[in-house]
Image (cartoon, helix red, strand yellow):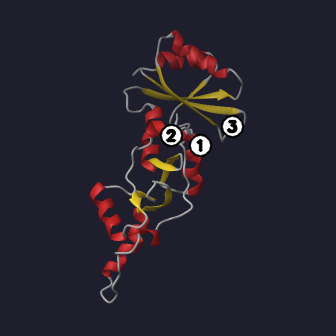
Amino acid sequence: MLVERIMTSPCITFHVNDSIEDAIKLMHDKKIRHLPIVDDAQHLLGIISDREIKEVLPSLLKQDVEIDYDVPISNIMQQNVITCHPLDFVEDIAIDFYDSSIASIPVVQNYKVIGIVTSKDMLNTFIELTGVTRPGTTIQISIPDEAGIMHEVTEVFHRHKISIESILVFRDKEQAGKKIVTLRMLAMNPNIAIYDLEQKGFKVLNPFELGL
């Protein structure tokens, strides 16, 4: 899946010379948590989030100190911003979210900000990919880590004309040489598929075996 599929575009931006006060008002009015900072040509110069705003706002509670919020947003914006391109893969930018512990990534094309991807967008994408928003059943299957083994799994569902909504595969941390397949099917009764999978020698896991 490409970034252009999940990004918010166009996104709200804020000029680098405008004030912190105006940025606070804009974020409050638009109910947004991330605001790319740009110049006249929409070139990205930085970004602010509600985290930076929260660090500034407590000063309002100090009665003995006057804080001037009519100063440029550049005073508090983050620079050296991680960006992505609309044709980047979502799984690639997911690594940036994970490694850098960030909550948003501006989307830049031809040096201009054309969109933004937030952690909420990433969560929504994960939910969409798992297929849990549609009625169905999820099972987990332990399989050998061998080339071509997934054909043996999916053949069961093809034979019974059961539609597969999503397949996620990850390595089994408990057993070397094994993988766990999380499969969501558009069927409320998976027993016939489970029976045939077990007849083929696959182990269908239950929540107690997974430590849940």
Which residue type does callout 2 highlight?
Val
| Above or below, comparing residue 81 to residue 74 in the picture | above
Do labels 3 and 2 touch, CB within 8 Å?
no
Residue 204 seen from this side = yes
Give the structural element (helix, strand or loop) at label 1: helix
| Above or below, comparing residue 86 to residue 82 in the picture | above
Instruction: Give left or right: position of 148 versus 16.
Output: right
**Disc ID at residue 92:** 1
| Above or below, comparing residue 94 to residue 156 in the picture | below
Rendered residue at 59%/19% (across/down): 153
Q: Residue furthest left?
A: 29
**Disc ID at residue 3:** 2
Which residue type does callout 1 highlight?
Asp
Rendered residue at 49%/50% (across/down): 112
Mark 3 or mark 2, earlier in chain: 2
Crowd tier of the residue under label 1, counting other residues whose Cα lies within 10 Å: few below 14, some 14–19, many 20 or above: few
Give the structural element (helix, strand or loop) at label 2: helix
Which residue type does callout 3 highlight?
Gln
Q: Residue furthest front?
A: 40
Q: Name the residue under label 3.
A: 175
x and y percentages locating residue 9 in the rendered image: 40, 43
Q: How far apart are marks 3 and 1 (CA)?
A: 27 Å
